[in-house]
Amino acid sequence: MEAFIQVNIENTASFSFQRPLLSWLKAQNPEIAVLDVDSLSDEMLITQASRLIQEAAKYAIYFKVAEPNGNLGAAFKLVEEIIREDKPGLILIEGTHTRLTAIVQSRFYLQYIPVNNPEEIKPHLKEYFNLADYLN
């Protein structure tokens, strides 16, 4: 199993049911498990995200930081899971979060890539998950 998790670091609840990046990735490969969480997600959802990391042969996590150095909140448990697992993965961070970036960069087994917007993520996901070149 392969997994992709979008983590929105924000101080207000986000109830958008449309996540274009998740839809795009599912269109590329329906077999990839996708999930989105945020810093205000409940424990059950964060536990589900942690389980995806544990069970996935390959995983990628996209942290979208709305406010510089915003409170990680519930998402910090997911960061702890990444550290605890010692499992290679792709970590993409959009926005500025000094603490999160330092944690990720200090783990040799994680591939860290800073990005400026969701469109920049697509080529990295295509390469990481070996998605077909002919798909947009």
Image (cartoon, grey):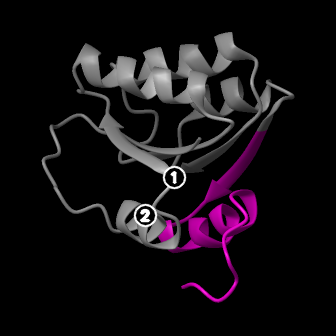
Residue at (57%, 48%) from the top-left corner? 93
Height in image: 93 above or below 124?
above
Q: Which residue is mark 1?
A: 32
Region of the chain picked out in magenta, as a range: 111-136
Residue at (66%, 53%) from the top-left corner? 114
**How far from the left and from the top, in percent, is residue 124?**
69, 64
Bin the neighbour count of mark 2 within 10 Å (Cα to Cα): few under 14, some 14-19, many 20 and up.
some
Look at label 2 and name its amino acid.
Lys
Q: Say which of 116 and 7 sits in front.
A: 7
In the rendered image, residue 134 lying in the magenta stretch gets the answer yes
Q: Earlier in the sequence, mark 1 or mark 2?
A: 2
**How far from the left and from the top, in percent, is residue 88?**
77, 32
In the rendered image, residue 117 lying in the magenta stretch gets the answer yes
Height in image: 114 above or below 21?
above
**How far from the left and from the top, in percent, is residue 115?**
61, 60
Horizontal side of residue 35 vs 118, given as left or right: left
Gap in Å between the C-alphas at discs 1 and 2?
7 Å
Residue 136 appears in the picture as rendered:
yes
The quarter of the displayed image where residue 23 is located? bottom left
Look at label 1 and name its amino acid.
Ile
Horizontal side of residue 112 vs 5, given as left or right: right
Height in image: 27 above or below 11?
below
Q: Identify the element where label 1 is drawn.
A: loop
Q: Say which of 69 and 122 sits in front.
A: 122
In contact (CB < 8 Å): disc 1 and disc 2: yes
**How far from the left and from the top, in percent, is residue 40?**
23, 27
Q: Say which of 16 and 25 sits in front.
A: 25
Q: Which residue is mark 2?
A: 26
Bin the neighbour count of mark 1 within 10 Å (Cα to Cα): few under 14, some 14-19, many 20 and up.
some
Q: Residue furthest top?
A: 84
Q: Residue furthest right?
A: 108
Residue at (68%, 15%) from the top-left corner? 85
